[in-house]
Amino acid sequence: MALTYDQIVRICKQINDKHMPDGQAFVDVVDEWLERYDGENGKEFMFQAFKKLLSLVDEHIHTIERKVNIRPTCTKGCTHCCYFPIITTRAEARWMMTHIAKLPNDERERIYKHIQWYTQHYAEQIKRVETLNFTEERHLKKMYMEEQIPCIFLNQQTNTCFIYDVRPIPCRTYVNYCSPSVCANSHMPNEPFSYEFLYEFYIDSLHDFIQTLIYEGEEVGIDYPDDLFTMDYLFCYFMDENK
């Protein structure tokens, strides 16, 4: 059942008061996985650790939902939030590239062709939004949404995500529990809920994984520390990769 805005506000308070995670599960995953690491192929290990931490974010969200008895009204094919500015680290983009490279040939080539089409089709809008400083612009989301640029990985024929399994944290942590119409009727609805507080646990865990492997002399497949702390619009990384 779709909730009202007032109900969402009350549930947010309940979550803040009683159900905020302390990050221990992320610490435990780092410890467990590092104990299992056999010293082989640090790049692949980091890629798998990245995917595990993404799934752990999902698990935390589902746990909170069960505790406060709420269910998302978001459905497959709903793409309103796919027009938000998605900002990630360069490291995350590199692991997304790894994911794409592992896909079957036809699926991988379809994504590469889509990126080429996207780069050309949205060239003018991209030029405008690239001038928006996402660290300083107070009205970034509104200004970006007005351009109506979809995520570079939105398949507009099927309204699905090309890289759903490794979709970034902003896509995982923004959830609507109210009527889906609130997203359809406004670029900036007040009702949807964000679990962005999980991001700190997630990025700290990635940092711990990488630091440990580098200390042991392993190759992790990214330029550390720059890649883990350099952030940009998601599309920028993949447009640069396909030039």
Image (cartoon, grey):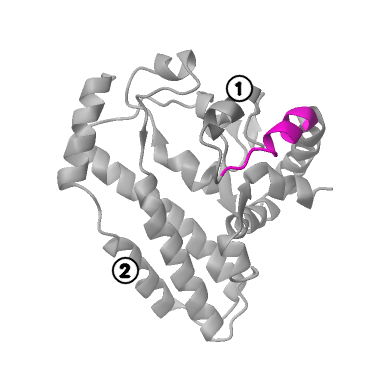
Disc 2 + disc 1, Cβ < 8 Å: no
Using a 10 Å C-alpha cutoff, classify the residue at mark 2 as few (fewer than 14 neighbours), some (14 to 19) or many (20 or more): few
- Give the alpha-carbon distance from disc 2 to disc 1, as whole Å: 42 Å
Who's the residue at 45% across and 20% down the image?
183
Using a 10 Å C-alpha cutoff, classify the residue at mark 1 as few (fewer than 14 neighbours), some (14 to 19) or many (20 or more): some
Residue 81 colored in magenta in the image: no
For this rendering, which residue is in front, 50 or 187? 187
Q: Give residue 143's quadrant in the image.
A: top right
Who's the residue at 60% across and 76% down the image?
41
Which amino acid, by three-letter code, is at mark 2?
Asp
Which mark is first along the chain, 1 or 2?
2
* Disc marking residue 146: 1
Position of 50 with respect to 71 (left or right) is right
For this rendering, which residue is in front, 167 or 223? 223
Who's the residue at 21% across and 24% down the image?
7
Residue 53, position as x, y percentages in the image: 43, 58
Q: Give residue 5's quadrant in the image.
A: top left
* Disc marking residue 19: none
Q: Give residue 111's quadrant in the image.
A: top right
Quarter of the image where the N terminus is located: top left
Instruction: Confirm whether residue 1 shows in the render.
Output: no
Residue 34, position as x, y percentages in the image: 42, 76
The residue pinned by badge 2 equals: 28
Which stretch did the figure color magenta?
Answer: 123-134
